[in-house]
Image (cartoon, rainbow, N blue to C red):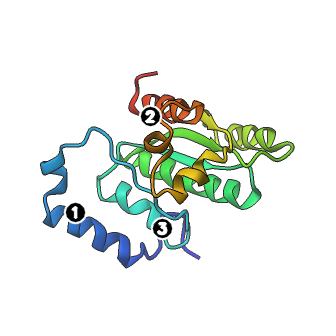
Amino acid sequence: GPMPGVGCAGRGIITAFEKLEELDAYEYYKPDVVLYDVLGDVVCGGFSMPIRGGYADEVCIVTSGEMMSLYAASNISYAVKNFGKMGYASLKGLIFNAKNFEGEKELLEKTAEEIETEIIYGIARDPLVQKAEAMGMTVVQAFPDSKMAKEYHNLANIVYGKN
């Protein structure tokens, strides 16, 4: 198949960005940070659309220590680093979305070392996420004083550069 990040770039992602531009969403809201939650499908390169389109300055890859997640993270990091050489966004690091299985952290640390990046933050698995989800809310909305909400605030500060 094609190199990671260079493939077909799903039409849905392209349409979403066209709509955001049509609505002048970035100019209207003037966001400081925009998060794109896209599939790590490295063949079709859907994750690379915000990068290639100039919509990203830095990329954080969210991954667990599961093998397929690490495989995708590794391929995405390869693509991001190649885009970085062409003047596009750079790789800020990995965000550890723990599943809490034995040896998981060590697997992620090994992968981070192999792809020459760092783990910028780790989020432990917490049942509050599913409870908030069932309420149609985020953890920060549903449980603002919880330890988990504090974790998300800490992560936001790191991603935003206020660490």
The quarter of the rendered structure image containing the N terminus is bottom right
Q: What distance separates the C-alpha of mark 1 from that of mark 3?
A: 20 Å
**SS for tag 3?**
loop
Name the residue tied to disc 3. 45
Q: Looking at the image, do the residues carrying marks 1 and 3 touch, with CB atoms under 8 Å apart?
A: no
Disc 2 marks a residue whose amino acid type is Ala
- Image location (x, y in percent) of residue 93: 55, 38
Which one is in front, 90 or 18? 18
Dot in front, 2 or 3: 2
Dot 2 crowding, Cα within 10 Å, few <14, some 14–19, many 20+: some
**Is residue 158 at all visible to an observer of this figure?**
yes
Give coordinates of residue 88: x percent, y percent: 36, 48
| Number of the label disc, if any, that sits on residue 156 | 2
Residue at disc 1, secondary structure: helix
Query: Measuring 70% from the left and 37% from the top, which residue is drawn there?
Result: 113
Give left or right: position of 155 versus 32: right
Which callout, 2 or 1, points at the residue further toward the start of the chain? 1
Task: Say whether disc 1 or disc 3 marks the residue closer to the N-terminus.
Answer: 1
- Percent of width and height locating residue 44: 50, 73
CA distance for labels 2 and 1 = 23 Å
Of residues 66 and 92, which is closer to you in this image? Answer: 66
Whichever of callouts 2 and 3 sits on the residue coming sooner in the sequence is: 3
Is the C-beta separation of discs 2 and 3 under 8 Å? no
The residue under label 1 is 20
- Is 136 on the left or on the right of 100, as rendered? left
The answer to whether 36 is drawn above or below residue 105 in the figure is below
Residue 77 seen in the figure: no
